[in-house]
Amino acid sequence: MFLGLDLGTSGLKGVVINDDGKVVAQASHDLMVSTPYPTWSEQAPEDWWQALEQVCEQLSQKIELREIEALGMSGQMHGATVLDAAGQVLRPCILWNDGRSKAQCDALMAAHPELLELSGNLAMPGFTLPKILWLQQNEPDIFNAIDKVLLPKDYLIYRLTGGFSTDCSDAAGTLWLNPKTRQWDESLLAMTGLTKANMPTVYEGQQVVGYLTADIATGLGFNEIPVVAGAGDNAAGAVGMGITEPGQGFVSLGTSGVYFAVSEAHNAKPEQTVHAFCHALPNRWHQMGVTLSAANSLAWFANVVSKSVPELLHELEQSNVMQTTVVFLPYLNGERTPINDALACGQFFGLVNATRREEMTLAILEGIAFSILDCQNALASAGTAVESLSLIGGGARSSLWRQLIANVLNKTLTYRDGGDVGPGLGAARLALLGVRELQGADIEQLIKQYCLLPNVIATHHPETSLQHYYEAKYALYQQLYQHTKSLNSDLAKLRSKS
């Protein structure tokens, strides 16, 4: 058996597969996000470790952990986890959806236009590089004490093995990696006063990077098994869903929303705010459009109205409300694709005295779907066409939401078995690939054998009768942001004074 651990923003999941690649056990533990100031988003790495311990404990009640042959990690990307020379965490991790480093991004792009060519991506507050610049300018004592900068999943691998490692897919989201060479770039590191000595070693996702230390193995209940490099959550999700070849893609409905497309080469289009990263498997790359608050927007609203997300969705389904004049912008944490605006704000527009809660829920689902359509259009403008589109992520469990997204994208969507645990499944598959490769098997043959498309649960074709409605709503959605864009900076100033 093989274990995949997926460190998400809202929780850590464990997925165990057998030698045939079938899921045999799952477990999860929730995590909280700290927002000490507006636009900030942080987590304590120790909380991740405690969640890992809890997940392993849960799994031990279902399977014999000593039968696990190898472990793989998937994780939320871009987070800045900084360690001192003794390997101790210096401060809470600054997460992917943290927007505090907008000024550093603007200064970086003005001073280093070569960043686009070297990294293939725009400087955005979500990425790791500008976060370190923010530390340099705002917390110099912390910056000066930095010995290593690790991504979230790589911190857990450090705790498990004692070694510093990362993989190409996750490292590409820092802005320090050159996706063409799949290695750190000294020029990019120099922009933040760092060198390769401050970075973990870069591997392909299935490569073994170390073994569980004796103490950790004993404490968690494993043997001293190998650990592979793993992958960023989206690349791991692609591996879990068999999305490994050009022309394939998926939409992920997690805390954030992602439109992911495999490419046969590094195809950078930063001017379209398209992310161009390495895939987790050798000789493969991918492009992404990202919306920062997908399922998070629905969870936020559920909390505001003291309902659960399932209750809101059930209420909407029972109401038969299919259309609404309410428009929602899901910019609760700013936005990436296509506007790259850390100051963008969430909005409801069109509320009247007769507006029902069901309409607001529907408007949220539509707004998130429109933001995914923005991603699809950005990828199309970069010359990327996705022929086969799957759905993954916790939000994909809702058939109503899946159908709505198919309608808005005007594209057939396939929801497959395991779509709600894609990244964890992908991490487990990478562990399986790594062990088999160590045993002498060819990696390309292994990918064909094990990285298969899961069974289809549901297929959603776009409903053409609603196309005019969605086209009109999408136009309003786009205009709403453009007409209120200038007010966001005024609101940001007001928040800073409060």
Image (spheres, rainbow, N blue to C red):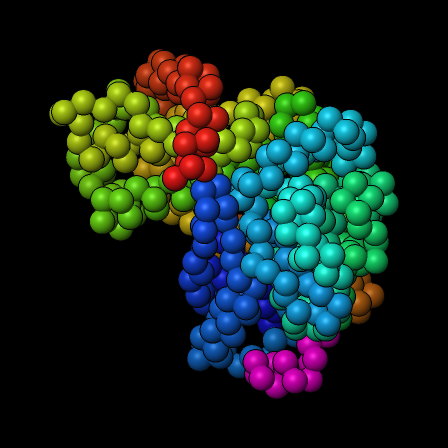
- Count of marks placed on residues: 0
> Measured along the vertical axis of the image, is residue 312 above or below residue 329?
below
Find residue 362 and report its image quarter: top left
**Magenta-highlighted residues:** 211-227
Q: Position of residue 343 (x, y in %)?
A: 49, 31
Report the side of 446 relative to 487 (left or right): right
On the picture, is 18 further left or further right than 207? left
Q: Nearer the viewer, residue 428 or 125?
A: 125
Residue at point 20%, 41% (across, down): 315
From the image, which quarter does the C terminus lie in? top left
Picture layout, residue 51 above or below residue 235: below
Residue 468 coordinates in the image, percent (x, y)? 35, 13
Q: Is residue 367 visible?
A: no
**Residue furthest front as drawn:** 497
Left or right of 120 in this view: 398? left
Answer above or below: position of 100 versus 349.
Answer: below
The answer to which image quadrant residue 197 occupies is: bottom right
Asked if the stretch drawn in magenta spans residue 464, the answer is no
Taking the spot 17% from the left edge, 31% from the top edge, the residue there is: 356
Q: Residue at x 36, y 37 (%)?
A: 401
Q: Residue at x 66, y 29 (%)?
A: 106
Residue 279 vs residue 116, the one in the foreground: 116
Is residue 224 rendered magenta in the image?
A: yes
Residue 325 shows in the view: yes
Residue 25 is situated, as x and y percent measured from the top left of the image, at 48, 69
